[in-house]
C-alpha cells in the first residue's frame, strides 16, 4: 500500500465513482437540499463528517467483532451504529461546539437515513480495504458528495430563473438538469487510471 | 369492507404510487433500472420486506413506545432485509451479485420506513399487509416501467432478449447514470401532464409526511425550515453578543 494507491482511492471517490452522480446513492438530499448554495455546502460537509465517523466505528466492528461468523448481522448492526452515532455526534456538537452545531446540526437528523453513508461503510468492507484505505475512501466519497451538491446548487439557481413548460416544472426539470451534470462527470471515467502514470 | 381493502391496495398501486407520485425511494429507482431483471429483483425484494415489516410493525404498534419507535422500526426492517438477503444469496446467487450493495440498502429505502410511519403504526395488521402489497407492487410497476424504457431504448434488449430494430439502433447512454436521471425526469413529467389533463391537484415534490426523518427531525430539516433555524441561531448569537456587551 503506497501513497499512490491512497490518492487513487480518494480521486476515484471524488470524481469517477461519484456516489450521487454515478452510483445513485444519496439522491434524496441531493434533490431536496440543493436549492441554495449555503445549504448544499452545509449538508455536504455534514455528510462527509458523518461518513468519516461512521467508517471509523463500523470498520473495527466488522473486523474485530462480526468477522466471518456474524457477517449476516452486518446490515442491522451498521444501520443501528450509524443511527446512534448521528444522535451522539449531534449531542456532542451541541454541548461542546455550539457554533458548529448551529451550522451543521439541522442537517444531522436527515443523515441517519442517507443511503450514501450506509453504502460507503458496506462498500469499504466489500472492497476489502484496510482501515486507512477505508477512511480515505470515505473522505473521497464525502468530498465527491460535497462537490456534486455545490455544483448542482449552482445549476439549480439557473433553473429558477428559467421558465420550463408547465409539466416539467419542479422535479422533472431538476432531474433532467441532474442528468446533464451527471453526463459531465461521465467524462472523468478513465482519468484516475492515467492520473499517476 | 372488502371494498375498503381494495381501495387501500389500489391506492398504493396507482393513486399514491410511491415512486411516481410520492417520489420516495429514488435511489434504487435510478440505480436498479438498467435491466428489467434487476428491476424485477429489486421490486420483489422490496415488496417482501415491505409486507413483512408492515405486518410486524402493525402487530406491535401498541407495544412500541412512541419515543423510540424509529430505532425499533429500523431493527424490524433490517431483520427482514437480512432475511431476504440470505434467501436471495442461497437461491438466486446471480441476482444477488447483480444487486450488490443496493439489496442491503433497502433498509434505508424511504418507502419502507415511510409506510411504517404513515400507515402501519395507525392501522390493523390485515390493512397494513394489503398496504404493503399495494405499495410494493406500485414500486415494482414503476421500476419495470423505467427499466423497460431504459433497457429497450438503451441496450436493444428486453429481459436479456433482443428486440428487433432497437438492437441495431440503441442509445447506450440511457443504461448509464445520466440516462437514469433523464428517463425518470421525463416519466414524472408525463405523469404531471396526465394529471394536469384530469384537472387533478398538483402534488408537492417533497413532503415531510413521506420523509422517514420527519419524525425525529420534527420537521426541522427541510430547506425552508433550515433557513428559519439558521436565522434563529444567528439571532440568538447576536442576542448573546449584545448581552455580553452590556
Image: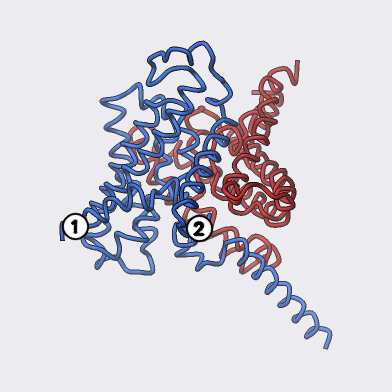
Chain colours: A red, B blue
Measuring from the top left, give residue A25's x and y in whole percent: 53, 40
Indicate left or right for A158 with B33 as reference.
right
Query: In the picture shown, does residue A195 fall above or below B178?
Result: above
> To which quarter of the image does residue A155 belong?
top right
Measuring from the top left, give residue B143's x and y in whole percent: 41, 36
Residue at the outermost left position: B1
Q: Secondary structure at mark 1?
A: helix
Residue drawn at point x = 47 percent, y = 45 percent: B191
Query: Which part of the image, by quadrant, shows the C terminus of chain A?
Result: top right
Residue nearest the observer in this picture, A167 or A20 = A167
Could you tell me if the residues under marks 2 and 1 are in contact, i.e. CB atoms within 8 Å? Answer: no
Q: Which residue is mark 2?
A: B202
Measuring from the top left, give residue B225's x and y in whole percent: 61, 67
Q: Secondary structure at mark 2?
A: loop
Residue nearest the observer in this picture, A127 or B47 = B47
Indicate left or right for B100 with B1 as reference.
right
Indicate left or right for A178 with B79 as reference.
right
Residue drawn at point x = 59 percent, y = 46 percent: A168
The mark found on residue B3 in the picture is 1
Residue nearest the observer in this picture, B161 or A44 = B161
Marks 2 and 1, how far apart at CA: 27 Å
Query: In the picture shown, does residue B90 fall above or below B223?
Result: above
Residue nearest the observer in this picture, A30 or B193 = B193
Residue drawn at point x = 66 percent, y = 30 percent: A183
Residue drawn at point x = 39 percent, y = 48 percent: B17
The mark found on residue A136 in the picture is none
Query: In the picture shown, does residue A129 fall above or below B194?
Result: above
Chain containing mark 1? B
Chain containing mark 2? B
Indicate left or right for B180 with B161 as reference.
right
Amino acid at each position: 500500500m503506497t501513497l499512490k494507491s491512497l490518492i487513487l482511492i480518494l480521486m476515484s471517490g471524488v470524481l469517477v465513482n461519484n456516489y450521487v452522480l454515478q452510483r445513485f446513492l444519496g439522491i434524496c438530499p441531493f434533490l431536496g437540499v440543493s436549492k441554495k448554495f449555503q445549504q448544499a455546502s452545509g449538508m455536504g460537509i455534514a455528510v462527509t463528517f458523518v461518513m468519516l465517523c461512521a467508517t471509523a466505528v463500523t470498520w473495527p466492528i466488522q473486523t474485530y467483532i462480526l468477522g466471518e461468523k456474524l457477517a449476516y448481522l452486518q446490515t442491522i448492526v451498521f444501520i443501528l451504529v450509524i443511527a446512534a452515532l448521528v444522535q451522539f455526534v449531534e449531542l456532542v456538537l451541541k454541548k461542546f461546539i455550539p457554533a458548529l452545531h448551529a451550522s451543521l446540526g439541522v442537517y444531522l437528523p436527515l443523515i441517519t437515513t442517507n443511503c450514501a453513508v450506509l453504502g460507503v461503510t458496506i462498500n469499504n468492507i466489500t472492497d476489502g480495504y484496510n482501515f486507512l484505505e477505508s477512511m480515505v475512501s470515505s473522505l473521497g466519497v464525502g468530498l465527491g458528495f460535497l462537490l456534486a451538491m455545490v455544483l448542482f446548487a449552482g445549476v439549480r439557481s439557473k433553473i429558477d430563473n428559467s421558465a420550463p413548460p408547465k409539466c416539467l416544472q419542479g422535479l422533472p426539470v431538476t432531474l433532467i438538469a441532474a442528468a446533464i451534470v451527471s453526463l459531465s462527470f461521465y467524462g472523468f471515467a478513465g482519468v484516475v487510471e492515467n492520473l499517476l502514470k | 369492507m372488502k371494498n375498503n381493502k381494495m381501495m387501500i391496495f389500489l391506492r398504493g398501486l396507482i393513486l399514491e404510487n410511491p415512486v411516481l407520485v410520492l417520489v420516495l425511494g429514488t435511489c434504487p429507482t435510478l440505480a436498479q433500472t438498467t435491466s428489467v431483471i434487476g428491476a424485477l429483483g429489486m421490486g420483489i425484494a422490496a415488496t417482501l420486506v415491505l409486507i413483512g415489516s408492515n405486518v410486524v410493525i402493525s402487530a406491535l404498534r401498541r407495544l412500541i413506545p412512541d419515543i423510540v419507535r424509529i430505532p425499533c422500526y429500523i431493527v424490524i426492517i433490517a431483520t427482514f432485509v437480512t432475511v431476504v438477503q440470505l434467501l436471495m444469496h442461497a437461491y438466486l446467487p446471480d441476482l444477488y451479485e447483480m444487486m450488490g450493495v443496493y439489496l442491503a440498502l433497502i433498509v434505508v429505502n424511504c418507502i419502507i420506513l415511510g409506510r411504517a410511519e404513515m400507515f402501519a403504526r395507525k392501522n390493523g395488521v390485515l390493512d397494513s399487509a394489503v398496504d404493503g402489497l399495494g405499495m410494493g407492487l406500485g414500486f415494482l410497476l414503476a421500476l419495470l416501467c423505467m427499466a423497460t424504457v431504459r433497457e429497450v431504448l438503451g441496450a436493444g434488449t428486453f429481459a436479456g432478449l433482443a428486440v428487433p430494430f432497437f438492437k441495431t439502433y440503441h442509445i447506450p447512454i440511457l443504461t448509464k447514470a445520466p440516462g437514469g436521471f433523464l428517463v425518470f425526469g421525463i416519466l414524472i413529467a408525463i405523469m404531471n401532464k396526465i394529471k394536469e389533463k384530469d384537472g387533478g391537484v398538483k402534488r408537492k415534490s417533497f413532503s415531510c409526511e413521506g420523509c422517514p426523518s420527519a419524525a425525529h427531525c420534527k420537521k426541522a430539516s427541510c430547506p425552508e425550515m433550515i433557513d428559519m433555524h439558521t436565522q434563529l441561531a444567528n439571532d440568538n448569537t447576536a442576542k448573546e453578543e449584545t448581552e455580553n456587551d452590556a
